[in-house]
Image (tube, helix red, strand yellow):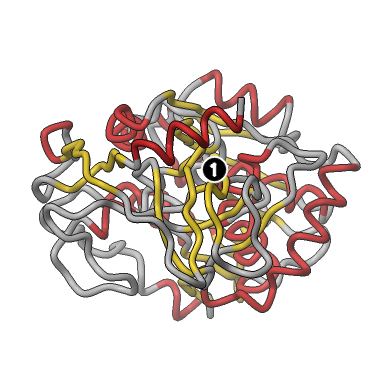
Amino acid sequence: MWLAQKAKIMTQLINRQICLKSRPEGTPVQDNFELIESPTTEPANGEILVRNEWMSVDPYMRGRMRESKSYVPAFEIGKPLEGGCIGRVVQSKCEGFVEGDYVLGNLGWRDLWTSTTENVRKIANGSVPIQSYLSVLGMTGMTAFVGLMRIAELKEGERVFISAASGAVGSIACQIAKIRNCYVVGSAGSEEKIEWLKNHAAIDAAINYHDCDDLPKRLAELFPEGIDVYFDNVGGDHLEAAIDNMRDFGRIVCCGMISGYNDETPQSGPPNLFKVIGKRLRLQGFIVRDHSCDQSEFARVMLQWIEAKRIHWEETVTEGLENAPKAFINLFSGDKMGKALVKI
């Protein structure tokens, strides 16, 4: 099957790609994206040709759809989008890579790509599903690991609150904190997600924020002695409620603020931000790509946890490259569970 697939690719070399047709105003819609076809050139010396099998859709991509300065360049109108992907080498003119190798790269949102092997990593099709290298063993899992272990400097037995706790990063962060024998509370947006957090992530309590009229009060009930670490994926009212309930010298890890990603006018900061001073809080944002030095340790430790069945994860899989925009748009509706992936 693989040889037949390869022969078809090499004969046609026609590449489908999802391009940014227009910059979204508010929540992205299907008309912001366009599927185009174009020829793909064969690899030059030192390059590989890869056919994608899996790609990731992530909330941070929404920021790249704005024409503004950020830690990564903005997507260009009329050009293919980018993101984490896993594919197989179709043709190699690079030492150390052979046809059929699985590789992890950053040229998703397309069928095929040709590149040098800079920023490309060969991965083994072993004891875990290959797409796990885009979720629990990839940027998702490492973001949770770095946020808790490096930025928060999490200690055994601390009190931890995690927002968007059933999401790709939050669900892994919950379980890392439990492995560290912490008391963990998470927030999510449906009863199905609440049940998963209790039964699979095994956290101590979960809040359905749609049914919670007073989040600061609910956190005070669940954290009578205060919060040591808040892992923030939401911002907005969750950040405000957490600040109210932080212990002195607590740490707030700013991983994401999805509540404001589609706002055309930026939200004002929490009105209780002044409490950061009196409580002597440390509030720090981070970008996981700044922590490549932790990649080896993360991979070793996470594989151990997976093999010991101490980490569980969910995937929401969308079939077909043509449906990648829909998978991305659904990130903002709260319908998905765990990591959102597209099987190309």
The answer to whether one can see residue 96 in this image is yes
x and y percentages locating residue 245 in the rendered image: 53, 57
x and y percentages locating residue 267 in the rendered image: 20, 58
Mark 1 closeness class: few <14, some 14–19, many ≥20 residues within 10 Å:
many
Residue under the image location 21 percent in, 62 percent down:
268
| Residue 9 falls in image quadrant | top left
Residue under the image location 48 percent in, 36 percent down:
341
x and y percentages locating residue 330 in the rendered image: 33, 31
* Residue in front for this viewpoint, 194 or 294: 294
The answer to whether one can see residue 226 in this image is no
Image: 6 above or below 21: above
Name the quarter where the N terminus is drawn. Answer: top right
Mark count: 1
x and y percentages locating residue 339 in the rendered image: 53, 38
Q: Is residue 170 left or right of residue 298?
A: left
| Residue 338 falls in image quadrant | top right
* Residue in front for this viewpoint, 40 or 282: 40
Residue under the image location 53 percent in, 52 percent down:
91
Residue matched to label 1? 168
Image: 278 above or below 38: below
* Residue in front for this viewpoint, 121 or 73: 121
Q: Is residue 117 left or right of residue 15?
A: right
Query: Which residue is outermost to the top?
Result: 192
| Residue 17 falls in image quadrant | top left
Q: Is residue 33 left or right of residue 51?
A: left
Residue type highlighted by circle 1: Ala
